[in-house]
């Protein structure tokens, strides 16, 4: 442990994005977390240098409009709080749409990275199981991403862990590999699904 880490306490917060909270962009989520943490817990740790900023990270960005019950944020404080007490303080000041679920004290050098993301998609009509089986039997999942930098082709097969349909609900599990993943909308487009 370095001298710089002695006076810092790192926490991992699990929270949800429900209701209006699901319409926050990644940037909005970070700003909201900063305000929430400042209001609830004294002693937010700031980086050093010319432009100090709070040490808050959200390892995986969630798309706008997607509800979640499993978001994760990590932050550092210069003051120690028992996790249960800190969670109670966060719950008192929580925004509607961003409920806190749990808080853990973690090692200062720990950096969380997601391994798998799970999604449930409500469908307007039942998706034919034969078509799903035929699509999933294919060896390739071509993903086409368009941005202001142009069009990029991506192979989605290494990222899709699981896909199943239960009535009018589709469940997807996607891997995160080296900071990359595929979006649920890209899988739905490939499957020709209308959510």
Image (cartoon, rainbow, N blue to C red):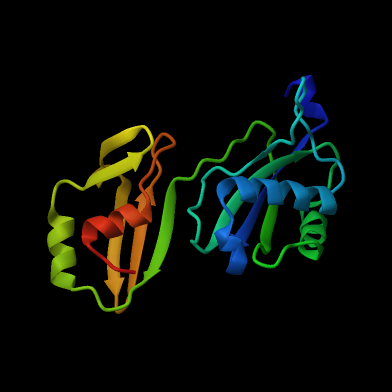
Query: Looking at the figure, which quarter contains the C terminus?
Result: bottom left
Q: Is residue 131 left or right of residue 29?
A: left
Q: Is residue 97 above or below residue 160?
A: below
Residue in the image at 23% along x and 55% along y? 190
Above or below residue 89? Residue 37 is: above
Count of numbered tags = 0
- In this view, the residue in front, 7 or 89, is 89
Q: Is residue 156 above or below residue 40?
A: above
Residue projecting furthest to the front = 148
Residue at left 61%, top 62%?
A: 21
- Residue 30 spot, x, y in % from top left: 65, 46
Does 43 sit above or below residue 138?
above
Which residue corresponds to the image point at 74% horizontal and 36% vertical from the top-left?
54
Q: Position of residue 81 (x, y in %)?
A: 83, 48
- Residue 183 screen position, x and y as percent: 37, 51
The front one of 144 and 138 is 144
* Left-right relation of 171 to 27: left
The quadrant holding residue 126 is: bottom left
Q: Position of residue 136 (x, y in %)?
A: 18, 57
User: Is residue 53 left or right of 128 when viewed as pictured?
Assistant: right
Q: Quadrant of the N terminus?
A: top right
Q: Residue at x 26, y 66 (%)?
A: 193
């Amino acid at each position: 442990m370095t001298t710089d880490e002695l006076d810092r306490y790192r926490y991992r917060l699990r929270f949800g994005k429900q209701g209006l909270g699901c319409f926050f962009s990644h940037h909005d989520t970070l700003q909201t977390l900063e305000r929430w943490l400042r209001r609830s817990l004294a002693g937010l740790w700031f980086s050093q240098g010319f432009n100090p900023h709070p040490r808050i990270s959200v390892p995986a960005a969630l798309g706008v409009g997607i509800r979640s019950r499993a978001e994760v944020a990590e932050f550092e404080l210069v003051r120690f709080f028992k996790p249960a007490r800190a969670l109670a303080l966060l719950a008192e000041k929580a925004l509607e749409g961003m409920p806190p679920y749990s808080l853990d004290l973690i090692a200062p050098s720990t950096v969380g990275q997601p391994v798998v993301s799970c999604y449930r998609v409500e469908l307007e009509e039942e998706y034919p199981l034969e078509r799903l089986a035929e699509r999933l039997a294919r060896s390739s999942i071509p993903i086409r991403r368009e941005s202001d930098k142009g069009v990029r082709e991506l192979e989605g097969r290494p990222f899709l862990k699981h896909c199943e349909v239960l009535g009018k609900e589709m469940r997807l599990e996607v891997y995160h590999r080296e900071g990359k993943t595929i979006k649920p909308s890209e899988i739905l487009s490939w499957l020709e699904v209308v959510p």
